[in-house]
Amino acid sequence: MEKFEKLTGVAAPMPLVNIDTDMIIPKVFLKTIKRSGLGVNLFDEMRYDREGNEIPDFVLNKPQYRDAEIIVAGDNFGCGSSREHAPWALRDFGIKAVISTSFADIFYNNCFKNGILPIVLPRDEVDLLMADAEKGQNARMTVDLENQEITTSDGETIAFEIDPFRKHCLMNGLDDIGLTLEKKASIDAFEARAAEARPWV
Amino acid sequence: MSGKTLYDKIWDAHVAHEAEDGTCLLYIDRHLVHEVTSPQAFEGLRMAGRKVHAPDKTIAVPDHNVPTTLDRAKGIENEESRIQVEALDRNARETGIHYYPVDDIRQGIVHIVGPEQGWTLPGMTVVCGDSHTATHGAFGALAHGIGTSEVEHVLATQTLIQKKSKNMKVEITGKLKPGVTAKDITMAVIGKTGTAGGTGYVIEYCGEAIRDLSMEGRMTVCNMAIEGGARAGLIAPDETTFEYVKGRPHAPKGAQWEAALAWWKTLVSDDDAHWDKVITLDADEIEPVVTWGTSPEDVLPITAKVPAPEDFTGGKVEAVKRALDYMGLTPGTPLNEIKVDAVFVGSCTNGRIEDLREVAKILDGKKVADGVRMMIVPGSGLVREQAEAEGLADIFKAAGAEWRLAGCSMCLAMNPDQLAPEERCASTSNRNFEGRQGYKGRTHLVSPGMAAAAAVTGHLTDVREMM
């Protein structure tokens, strides 16, 4: 996994609440057996008409947001299905950070497995960043994971919280499975205890 | 020190390792697998030269892509769908996990097959690359959906890296009124708390109305915990649970049954347990409900009218404008005057035998209205077999409904079972998102009885008028 350290880029404003994973990547694209190549279908039904033409007023089709690397989103972003195709599509498009007042639990977890940083902030701060994102491509914001702060295009800084273990993994691009397998002795010991306590499992 | 909740007890019994910062390795007792979210995980294992750690605790079944038409033995027409199911076939056979292929009578929706075969038991940890894994919480199991990276993690290690969620209690006091079902309970709760109301929590459902539910009803309630934003929903096991589990193919037998039962009976929240959030609903106040918008929180009693954007505040105002436009609805329209083109009965929410019985009760001796197509899709081959033995299938066919083979079908429309643009559907499934049942399709979530009533009248209908 690619390391996440510091990112300066264009942020796209998506104030709609409850943007669900069916919107992020509709089910017709879940038939792939690969992880890559989904970026072109990110937000497919909002982004293209039935003939495949771009819908000009969709935010990521606007010239100033085509290269966005950050999304500032409405409440409860990523609700719905567990499909990891949603963060795969975001990452493949080039999105590396999403900022909202809240995220659905499974989507939030899935982001970290794919080098995407989801940031939860209070409403007034999300509103401020939304306004900054609405300024377009000249207004680039910076997300600094190490120092846990976002800097707006006006130089204002906003601090954010993140679980230290997740931060460590993201900053070092660590593979979870490798880390867990280092604790194989604990897993084996647990299995031996559980087999005795609950042999029917 | 306060007592423990049911969630605390199951959690404590499954921590294989705890780091100083509270990050835990949670041991997984059952890993359910379907064809859509697993191919990349198996591929990842192969690339890293890793093996499935516990094939005997891993159960796979294709459900999302499978055709539900009676001629499905001839194979899957769509090439990508076929490749995905073939990949699961191959991965299951190569790794030696338990597998129910398409032509097995036990095949069906993964969340119906697991309980039916006795794989899901009280006190277990159950995961699947599917958000509706919450269903299994009905047994007093800690069950939740995971992403594909986590599927790979569980395949390789039989654990998940987890931090504990908070505890939320949802109590439904008193008794349900006639015509009000488990589906109405779970939707009414989401209507009250919103789709983010459960975010960060594991919910335990309790109270008299929950105790009175069958296992099928409890599965319906827990199934939609995820639509309320919760990681999982739980119901403490009791005699109803034990009765359902006993004698199932993979349930414990003999002395092991007795040992299991002794432990299962301890799986209740202590009276002095700490709850981070408590929601109470009076069962008597719950009406048959229906969704009018494109979020599962857009819930109202069938007796209400389509709301207006001005009835809401904040970001929801714009969302409601968008939803009404998408749904083709005008504020002030009585919900029971909304005409439907299609009715879908099925899914992991309402594809069990009890749901089909509810539908048959309403359809018996009646016809599906002209111009309405009704599709009834059992949750598993065994549910289908039972519905035929009980004569339900004859009622469905006589009414003019399509009686299909088992699968996820039009709940998410990954197979050919889809709505056409602007087609309107009364559906027993769990999500009314834009495009969920087909591009530009319009979904109204309802209980099985309400779906059947809409099929007969051709518009959303209060099921109590037909009882």
Image (spheres, rainbow, N blue to C red):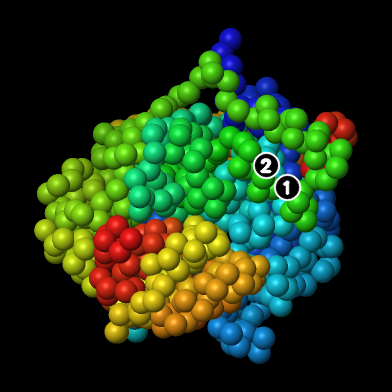
Residue at horizontal 41 percent and vertical 80 percent from the top: B399
Q: Amino acid at mark 1?
A: Lys
Residue at horizontal 57 percent and vertical 66 percent from the top: B379
Q: Are marks 1 and 2 on the same chain?
A: yes
Residue picked out by circle 2: B242
| Residue A138 coordinates in the image, percent (x, y) | 28, 52
Q: Are marks 1 and 2 in contact (CB under 8 Å)?
A: yes
Task: Report, in whole angstroms, how far the alpha carbon at label 1 lies from the one at label 2.
Answer: 6 Å
Say if residue B414 shows up in the picture: no
Residue at horizontal 73 percent and vertical 39 percent from the top: B27
Left or right, residue B139 beside residue A151: right
- Quadrant of the snapshot with the C terminus of chain A: top right
- Which chain contains the residue that carries disc 1? B
Q: Quadrant of residue A158?
A: top left
- Which chain contains the residue that carries disc 2? B
Left or right, residue A121 beside residue B326: right
Q: Secondary structure at mark 1?
A: loop
Residue picked out by circle 1: B246
| Vertical position of residue A6 compared to residue B129: above or below | above
Q: Secondary structure at mark 2?
A: helix
Q: Amino acid at mark 2?
A: Phe
